Image: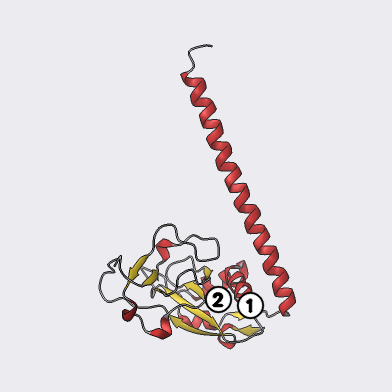
Amino acid sequence: MKRIVDLVNAFTGHTLRGRMENDPNGDCVIVQAKDLTTSGVVKFRHTPYKIALKQVPPAQLLQKGDILVLSKGTNNKALLYDAQFPSAAATSAFTVLRITNNQIKPAFLAWYINSPQAQEYFSTQRAGTTTLNLSKKAIEDLPVPVPPLLKQELMIKLVKQHELYASLVDEYQSNLQTLVNNILNNRLNDKTV
């Protein structure tokens, strides 16, 4: 077991001064918690906000393989950034983890942070009265098992297969619900008995 601090460089996302305004001509995407799905990778629900790149310190720009941990509230999930945009930064609602140790794969670490064991640890580390916060130190102190790289890769493949299966099941259920609704609506509007 290692602590996260032994595996990554952790830093807080970019602090925006004042209310964030979308700049359609901006050249830096801002990753906000409200934009994201909970699939375990950074996927936007809608077009993300942009700001001018010069507003973001270079050290806070996201890189492929960075892990974003939501540090506000009770849902402290990790999301893997896959470099979808040339320039992007996370807001200060996130703690960004950048791998510094070649013994761990970013996807494995993101998966582990989302595991029940890590989430249980985080639930004991949150502080605050109105809004719960997970400190950078609490994240850095999380104990993490570090299996051999081949085992990590196999585990990641299994997780991806499960996510694909779950996605297909969700799509099937949605399509089935639409079909049933259409049939029932057609029967309702049919004048024959």
Left or right: where 11 falls relative to 51: right
SS category of the residue bearing label 2: loop
Q: Considering the image in quadrants, where does the C terminus appear?
A: top right
Circle 2: residue type: Gly
SS category of the residue bearing label 1: loop
Res 110 → quadrant:
bottom right
The residue to which callout 2 is attached is 65
Cα distance between the residues tagged 2 and 1? 9 Å
**Total labels drawn:** 2
| Few, some or many residues within 10 Å of mark 2 (<14, 14–19, 20+) | some
Determine contact: label 2, label 1, CB under 8 Å.
Answer: no
Res 6 → quadrant:
bottom right
The residue to which callout 1 is attached is 105
Query: Whole-percent x and y of residue 186?
Result: 50, 23
Left or right: where 23 falls relative to 105: left
Tell me which label, 2 or 1, sits earlier in the chain.
2
| Few, some or many residues within 10 Å of mark 1 (<14, 14–19, 20+) | some
